[in-house]
Amino acid sequence: MLVASLLTGIFICFGVPAVGLVVLLGRHQKKGVGLAFLWGALAFFVSQVVIRIPILQIVLPGMAWYAVLQMDPWAYGLFLGFTAGLFEEGARWIAMRLLLKGKTERVHGLAFGLGHGGIEAMLLVGINFMVILVMVLAGQASLFPLEAGGVFLGGVERLYAMAFHVGASLLVMHGIRRGRQVLWLGIAILLHTLMDAAIVILGNAFSVGVLGIELFGAVSAILTLALGLGMYAREKKVE
């Protein structure tokens, strides 16, 4: 079961973004779809891997106020959520404004979000799953005391995280299209903050279990995706 869960997670992390991109390229003969995917991936890599994560892991641990902050689940959760939203949504907006000029149709937003969420899944989960799978198949399963159910949930979490990133990308891009960039960028940051903050707050302040946290995340992602798709559908209806 563990091997099956690892394979499922690996497919979600690597296969879903790849298959999604192929489908978008095949169904929509629009220029810039592939580039939107790449810029979305770059937006995550720069905002999180290059900037935010090193700050959280290297710079802030040496500061007294940060140690105090970590003792309060509400403050710490909101801090992590807000910084994630600010950096990632800000990076989305910058990339869309500077690198995707004139390419703000729905398919571009879908590709951008898929690239953003896809590279996150690959780097944070997919590669680890691949390493663990190799070790398990080599008879070193004892080094990784993992449960198949937990691994499976980890893969599912990446699936709805990608859905969230697609929805958030559509919202930011919608704001650029309609000349209401500050409003929709702010909404995307707020939604990102609430979703990420809940991971810390629900578990530590309310003792919510893993399934409850995952359910909250899934519902939040689905609602964000629905909102993003809905705004583009509304544009089309108005036009």
Image (tube, rainbow, N blue to C red):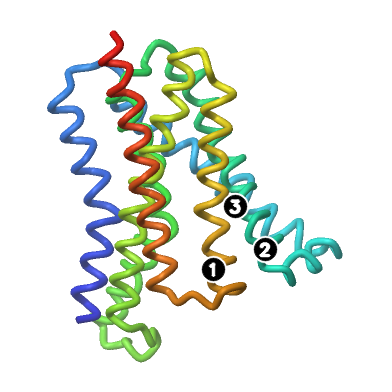
Q: Position of residue 6 (x, y in %)?
A: 26, 71
* Alpha carbon separation for disc pair 2 and 3: 10 Å
What is the CA distance from the residue labelled 1 to the residue labelled 2? 9 Å
Going by the numbered disc 2, the residue's amino acid type is Trp
Q: Is residue 50 above or below residue 12?
A: above
Question: Hey, what amino acid is under mark 1?
Answer: Leu
Counting residues from the N terminus, which is met first, the one under dot 1 or under dot 2? 2
> Tag count in the figure?
3
Q: Residue at x 64, y 47 (%)?
A: 83
Residue 202 marker: 1
Q: Local crowd at mark 3 within 10 Å, few (<14), some, or many (≥20)?
A: many
What element does badge 3 sit on?
A: helix
Residue neighbourhood size for the residue with mark 1, other residues' Cα within 10 Å, grouped as few (<14), some (14–19), many (≥20): some
Percent across and percent down for residue 233 are: 28, 23
Q: Earlier in the sequence, mark 3 or mark 1?
A: 3
Name, please, the residue furthest toward the right: 64
Residue 151, percent across and down?
32, 73
Q: Which residue is mark 3?
A: 81
Quadrant of the drawing holding the N terminus: bottom left
Q: Which residue is mark 2?
A: 74
Residue 154: % across, % down: 35, 67
Kindly state the secondary structure of the residue where label 2 is placed.
Answer: helix
Residue shown at the point (42%, 55%) measured from the top left: 123
The residue that appears at 42% across and 39% down in the rendered structure is 41
Which of the 4 image quadrants contains residue 229?
top left
Q: Residues within 10 Å of mark 2 (few under 14, many from 20)?
A: some
Q: Amino acid at mark 3?
A: Gly
